[in-house]
Amino acid sequence: MIRKISLGLLAVFFVMAGVGHFVSPETYLPLMPPYLPWHLALIYMSGAAEVAGGLGLCVPQLRRAAGWGLIALLFAVFPANIHMLNDGLVLGEMIVPKWVLWMRLPLQAVLMAWIWWAAIAGRAKTDGTNSALR
């Protein structure tokens, strides 16, 4: 039951976060490291990946792949978190405090572990599925 609730929370979190990339992409532009090309395209692609991963968590046959995909996405965006920490972050007229930027780093690891527990480890039976999660 806790795993099902976790999957639902993760799905809602990632779908909402992904939709945010399309609704207000300008919010994400300051997060982009200058060494990456095509900032807007990358924002849309990461948003689409979040939506797809979040929805995939809801489909038992796709859950494991969605979990690995979301973990890979979190790993891929980690350099942006380092960039924000090093260069600071201003959103509109608000300067994001350094402690918030520091907290984002372990939060990525917590999210990865949560996804792994809910979507991947929970399906580790001999046949590769866990019927209790369907």
Image (cartoon, rainbow, N blue to C red):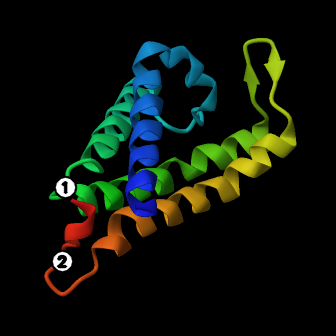
Observer-nearest of 133 and 123: 133
Q: Is residue 22 shown above or below 54?
A: above
Residue 62: numbered disc: 1
Location of residue 20 in the rendering, given as x and y in whole percent from the top left corner: 47, 23
Residue at left 37%, top 74%?
A: 121
Left or right for 52, reference 83: left
Vertical placement of residue 132 versus 10, above or below: below
Dividing the picture into quarters, in which one does residue 72 lie? bottom left
Q: Nearer the viewer, residue 51 or 83?
A: 51
Against 32, residue 73 (above or below) is below
Q: Is residue 15 left or right of residue 101?
A: left
Dot 1: within a 10 Å radius of its alpha carbon, few (fewer than 14), some, or many (20 or more) residues? some
Residue marked by disc 2: 128
Quarter of the image where one finds residue 22: top left
Per the model, the C-alpha gap separating discs 1 and 2 is 12 Å
Classify the position of the C terminus by image quarter: bottom left
Identified by mark 1, the residue type is Leu
